[in-house]
Image: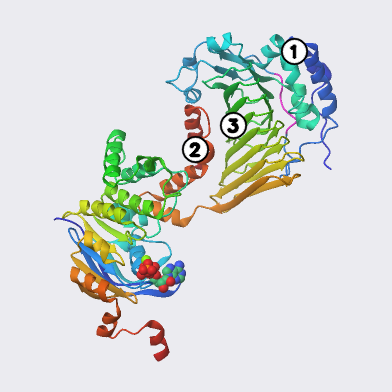
Amino acid sequence: MSGSVLEIKNLHVSIEDKEILKGVDLTVKGGEFHAIMGPNGTGKSTLASAIMGHPKYEVTEGTITLDGEDVLEMEVDERARAGLFLAMQYPSEISGVTTSDFLRSAINAKREEGDEIPLMKFIKELDKDLDYLDIDQNMATRYLNEGFSGGEKKRNEILQLMQLKPDIAILDEIDSGLDIDALKVVSKGINKMRSDNFGCLIITHYQRLLNYITPDFVHVMMQGRVVKSGGPELAKRLEAEGYEWIKEELGIEDEETAEQNA
Amino acid sequence: MTVETKLPFNQEYIQAFSKDRNEPGWMATIRSKALEMADSLDMPKPDKTKISNWNFTDFQHSYKEAATIASLDELPEELKAYFDKDASMENLYIQRNQTAAYNSLAQDLQDKGVIFTDIFTAINEHSELVEKYYMNDAVAVDQNRLTALHAALMNGGVFVYVPKNVQIEDPLQAIFWQEDTDSALLNHVLVVAEEGSSVTYVENYISHNDTEETVANLVTEVFAHDNAQVAYGAVDNFAAGTTTYVNRRGVAQRDAQINWALGQMNDGNTISENITYLLGDNSNSEAKAVSVGRGKQTQNFTSSIRQFGKQTDAYILQRGVMKGAATTIFNAIGKIEHGGTKSNSEQESRVLMLSEKSRGDANPILLIDEDDVTAGHAASVGRVDPLQMYYLMSRGLEQEEAERLVIHGFLAPVVSQIPIESVRKQLTQVIERKVY
Ligand SMILES: Nc1ncnc2c1ncn2[C@@H]1O[C@H](COP(=O)(O)OP(=O)(O)OP(=O)(O)O)[C@@H](O)[C@H]1O
Ligand SMILES: [Mg+2]
């Protein structure tokens, strides 16, 4: 079998008793790159958080499975060890813990006890990835995300992605706040991951990221649902025309208007 | 007012004790006067901690000489962990109970006039020097009942003297190993750094009396003369049976620096005062302290820097982790005296609570008698941030491991300041042991 399969079916998610996701269906397989686009506040980060197991998000209906295993039954760390990864829109700052100490712990967390990564091997691979992502060596000894600029945090998320080599990764607005050079570098890192054993779900607002990372599928999320799916050309049309045409095409009303009409 | 029981020591005992050690007259006098005073002086009054039913005064003082240590290989593994195996430990003092059991100092430092010896030898061989500093300007005999008791019954310690313009690169390390479970330790550390000199000193207190009850009454006095630099590191690790009073004071003259990094890892009840006087213009001090409270222990840590000189700079940083039903109070007091113009004073106290039953309190206090100064303070008492936990766990770390990283990270600003790597590692291990 090549690659893992992440399957999301009829997913409903609430936060503080407010339903945000209202039945999402999506399947990501090893070897596939999916892009999710959609207006602000439509539930893209909610989907990512629910997959990873963020404590605030409550799944009220539906299923998430990874290679048939029930992801919703797993703790956050078990999901990670099962092969999931989420590059977060707003990564936490962990004071006093260096990026390199943290990475080594995370790599070892996936390995058996007694089979920890040898220090020299770790350093070599870390250096290689730092180089590849054009990251200053001293980031490894800085405290994780503390005082990092927005762009540095995003690069660091991709560094972690490359180091941890998950089966399925979700990248939540990995391109936000990046300058052109950083965007190229980050895309280079993501593209390097491309293989039959790696599937990726890329949440973005902009076509410019997709110029560097060509998605196999593009999905549009609105009001807590995937309302339209297509190929790379769909992203280009969204970039050119915005979301109005989809609303018209599918007869979607703005939520406030809908409430007034109801 | 609680009625204090009368002290179980008399003049006769103290004079005999002093005579046994061939102490000069001035020392015998200090002891005798101190005992006289002790009865009438008040106990220290740590802010927000009630110590009226703690036992600081009833303890066993007499002891048998312990064996000296011919080779470091003889030491138990637990102690060996405190040394840098790779570094040659040339500057080392080990006190076994109240006996100076091992002492070495690099030849070139001896040649330069550096003194690093046990307090009794120092009192005999460098009588005038010690007399000049001993319980005069830093810790006063009559500060409170416990300092008086200390002066009367002092039974161990070390003297560090760095002559003018001598820079000591390698740290000096003292290990106070309380192997005997029931005799009290009244230890005195005196560090004198003459003009333009510099020294790094690190000490470890270790005991094993989990159930037997005893007392530690410790005094440190540090003097940094003009343009001298003293880095002072400590890991206190008394077992649960020891009730500790520790009073560490420093006096910095013009352009001098005294930096403290204190790992306060006792398992018993503890009162700690760390006070630095920035007397000279342009002097500065950092007072960093870290603690882990567990079980039912109650601790009170007061760090204070009093700024008299102009353009002085003071930074107090306290970090504590509380678990079980432990209670800890952190007081960080910055005081800029009248005349201390263009000085800066900062305090930061942060407490991380790991259990429902533990109690922590962080009180940064700023007292300013001068207009032309800068100052700032911060405090927090909180729990481990669930979003940090989520982030770390989303990378595959188990909950316990994620929490471990957050805790070490939280304590790192102080731990990383401990001067000797092996001691730093040891402190990290003690933290680990106390947290889990
Ligand atoms: N903690 C919270 N409490 C209440 N509402 C929340 C909370 N977190 C998110 N929401 C709401 O859930 C909805 C979906 O948010 P989500 O972050 O998933 O949107 P998004 O599609 O990722 O938007 P963006 O493109 O701006 O990142 C929003 O209306 C948001 O206000
Ligand atoms: Mg979002």
- Nearer the observer: mark 3 or 2; the answer is 3
Q: Whole-Å distance between the Cαs marked 2 and 1?
A: 44 Å
Q: Which residue is label 1 attached to?
A: B128
Label 1 CB-ligand 1 distance < 8 A: no
Ligand 2 rendered quadrant: bottom left
The front one of A13 and B91 is B91
- Nearer the observer: mark 2 or 1; the answer is 1
The chain carrying label 3 is B
Residue count near mark 3 (Cα–Cα under 10 Å), binned few <14, some 14–19, many ≥20: many
Label 2 CB-ligand 1 distance < 8 A: no
The answer to whether marks 2 and 1 sit on the same chain is yes
The front one of A84 and A182 is A182
Residue count near mark 1 (Cα–Cα under 10 Å), binned few <14, some 14–19, many ≥20: some
Who's the residue at 31% across and 34% down the image? A119
Q: Whole-Å distance between the Cαs marked 1 and 3?
A: 30 Å
Q: Amino acid at mark 2?
A: Arg
Number of disc labels:
3
N-terminal label among 2 and 1 = 1
The front one of B363 and A112 is B363
Instruction: Specify how the rendered protein is coloured.
Output: rainbow
Image: magenta residue range: B56-62
- Nearer the observer: mark 1 or 3; the answer is 1
Q: Which residue is label 3 attached to?
A: B236
Q: Whole-Å distance between the Cαs marked 3 and 2?
A: 14 Å
* Rendered location of residue A149, percent (x, y): 41, 52
* Rendered location of residue B420, percent (x, y): 50, 27
The chain carrying label 1 is B
| Relative to B195, residue A29 above or below | below
A136 vs B284, left or right, is: left
